[in-house]
Amino acid sequence: MLSVIIPIFNEAESLPQLVGELDRVAQAEGYDLQTILVDDGSNDGTWQVISRLAADDRRILGIRLRRNFGKAAALRAGFDSAEGDRIVTLDGDLQDDPAEIANLLAKLDEGYDVVSGWKRERHDPWHRVALSRGFNWLVRLMTGVMLHDHNCGLKAYRREVILEIRLYGELHRFVPVLAAGNGFRVAEVVVNHRPRKHGRSKYGMSRVVKAFLDLLTVKFIVGYGHRPQHVLGTIGLVSLLCGGLGMFYLAVRWCLSRMIDGWQIVHLHETAALYYALALFIIGGQFLSLGFLGEMIAALLVRETDTYSISEHTPPARGPSHTPSAKTS
């Protein structure tokens, strides 16, 4: 079974055409299709359209969230209800072409776990394209996951990927990064991008700031999620070392000014370096404390979640060495 998840916010006009295109693709490719339409708090009649479509086609599952929780939450709701071994996500604005699903799945069949679409030729305003390219360059630089288009909503996953990765906030655009951090194989394929026909874009400048902050979060989670003290403690120790060197320098200078005739007397309370050194001491102590708190939280979480990801198992071992010895009477 193939599960297609579509998070939707105020896309009532686009849904009938999108569902029809998905049905034609499923018939042409022979997919056992499950379509999950997640209404993320729409207020334009989207839920009424979803209800009608689901009544006409039992392969369609409609999910209505109580309010607008964001795309990551909508995807998580869809993932929790998906039954397929392969899962595809796409946006509900008709800009993602359902005909590209076959190309994504073909790439999965090559042994990859996550396949992301690459909108090489985009039909968006120039400022959105420029911001997106700059952001994707920054993501590649900071994470090492060399995808050209992390923001593309058209992606394909193996089921085990979504079982291990939990989405929250606005981390949906970083699923390939999180998957790569767990050892899954990630690839991309060029996909067709279509102009918007209905509604308006949900993209705004506020998302640029949020996306950058989320990138920092993902970088920390992937690199130090289970060992926060390694980064926080390092910053703290460096800060303490710099503060200590500054205080040592001031102490030596003060002593020499008292011991050697002709040296200008040093008044430490009038020296800016004293306050810089004290500030470094305080900052270092705070970072070390944060690191210890992070380690305590990580230790608690480790009891509930695995810190590893298994790719596959060999068959269970059998043989004389693993056969329980018979009890002697």
Image (tube, grey):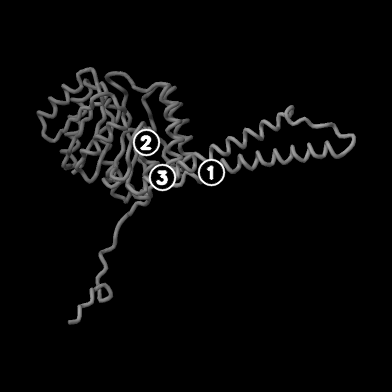
The reply to whether discs 1 and 2 touch (Cβ–Cβ < 8 Å) is no
Image quarter hosting the C terminus:
bottom left
Label 3, label 2: how many angstroms apart (C-alpha)?
35 Å
Q: Split into 4 quadrants, where in the image is the N terminus?
A: top left
Residue 197: image location, x then y, percent: 28, 20
What amino acid type should be assigned to the residue bearing mark 3?
Ala
Depth check, mark 3 against mark 2: the one in front is 3
- Per the image, the residue denoted by label 3 is 298
Q: Residue furthest right?
A: 262
Residue name at image x 56 percent, y 39 percent? 285
**Mark 1 = which residue?**
233
- Return the disc, 1 or 3, that comes first in the chain's sequence: 1
The residue under label 1 is which amino acid type? Gly
Q: Earlier in the sequence, mark 1 or mark 2?
A: 2
The residue positioned farthest toward the bottom in the image shown: 329
Q: Quadrant of residue 12?
A: top left
User: Which residue type carries mark 2?
Assistant: Trp
How many neighbours does mark 3 have within 10 angstroms: few (below 14), some (14-19), or many (20 or more)?
Answer: some
Residue 237 image position (x, y, % from top left): 59, 43
* Left or right: 130 in relation to 69: right
- Which residue is tagged 2? 118
**How far apart are labels 1 and 3 at the CA level?**
15 Å
Foreground tag (1 vs 2) = 1
Disc 2, SS = strand
